[in-house]
Amino acid sequence: MLTGIGLGMLPLLMADLPEQALAEIAQHHAHWPREPVSCAQLGETISTSYVNCYRGGDAGLRWLEPELPRLSKAFLFKTAIGKSSLTFFHALALVHAYPTASRAEATVLRARLQAIVPRLERERSPFARYVVLGLRLALAVIDERVDEARDLVSEIRRRGESSGDFLSLHAPLYLEGLLDGGDAGLEKRNAALAAYASRGWKNPRRALVMFAPMIDVLEARMSA
């Protein structure tokens, strides 16, 4: 349970060992029955999604989408936090898959993300109201609506500062740096990377991209 809901695999991600993190999750959840879906599977889903976000690319989609029919019928994933978490990680997996997708695949991914956002906006949980900002930001970045992206980054960063949430504070700082460009932008990006490095993350950039895959979208566009 600690490996799943308790995110006990985070030290392995900090050491840049995502495959070992997946193996540890699988080992600690192997003895739990698949049905009925229990708190153990809730933890397995959340922790595996964390690792796949760290891995990036289409890893999250390839793992989660086959599981969606089973999980979405379960009582735990019909509760406010369970439903919001499952929807959020599915949407995040779509964004992670976007930078490496073909043009046709990217169009489909964007449309699917667009369809998910209103569902989260209708959710009442504070978690849903918060994470939907990042998904709206992803759409703004994909659509190259720069002013809207700046406004959303500022709002996410403001909320992160008020809550003291580490992830919500430094990923937007890096995104601000990308949107600003120039020496000032580079300084912000380096500051965000340094903040993660100071916490012991071996690969600070991957840590930032974990919940801000828009970084990959923007940097792929910049290098094209």
Image: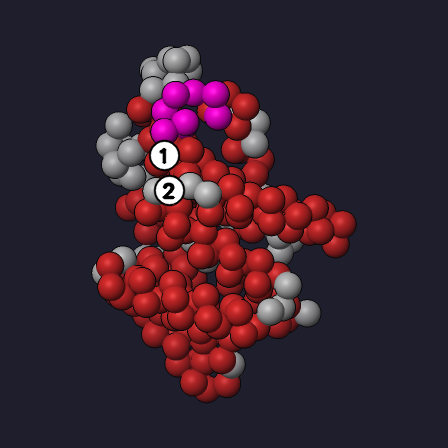
Return the x and y of residue 33 as percentages of the image width and height: 38, 13
Return the x and y of residue 91 as percentages of the image width and height: 52, 44
Sort mark 1 into few (<14), some (14-19) or many (20+) by Cα contacts within 10 Å. Answer: some
| Residue 213 visible in the shown view | no
Residue in the image at 51% along x and 57% along y: 136
Comparing 114 with 7, the one in front is 114
Total count of labels? 2
Which span of residues is magenta-colored? 72-80
Q: Is residue 24 left or right of residue 147?
A: left
Comparing 17 with 85, the one in front is 85
- Residue under pointer 1: 80
| Kind of residue at badge 2 | Arg
Return the x and y of residue 47 as percentages of the image width and height: 37, 37
Q: Which mark is residue 124?
A: 2
| Residue 119 visible in the shown view | yes
Mark 2 residue element: loop
Return the x and y of residue 35 as percentages of the image width and height: 41, 13
Q: Nearer the viewer, mark 2 or mark 1?
A: 2
Please say whether residue 74 is one of the residues in the magenta stretch: yes
Please say whether residue 170 is one of the residues in the magenta stretch: no
Main secondary structure of the magenta stretch: helix
Q: Are circles 2 and 1 on residues that touch, CB within 8 Å?
A: yes
Mark 1 residue element: helix
- Quadrant for the N terminus in the image: top left
Residue in the image at 62% along x and 56% along y: 99
The image shows residue 193, relative to residue 118, as above or below, that is below
- Quadrant for the C terminus in the image: bottom right
Residue in the image at 31% along x and 62% along y: 159
Comparing 77 with 102, the one in front is 77
| Kind of residue at badge 1 | Ala
Dot 2 or dot 1, earlier in sequence: 1
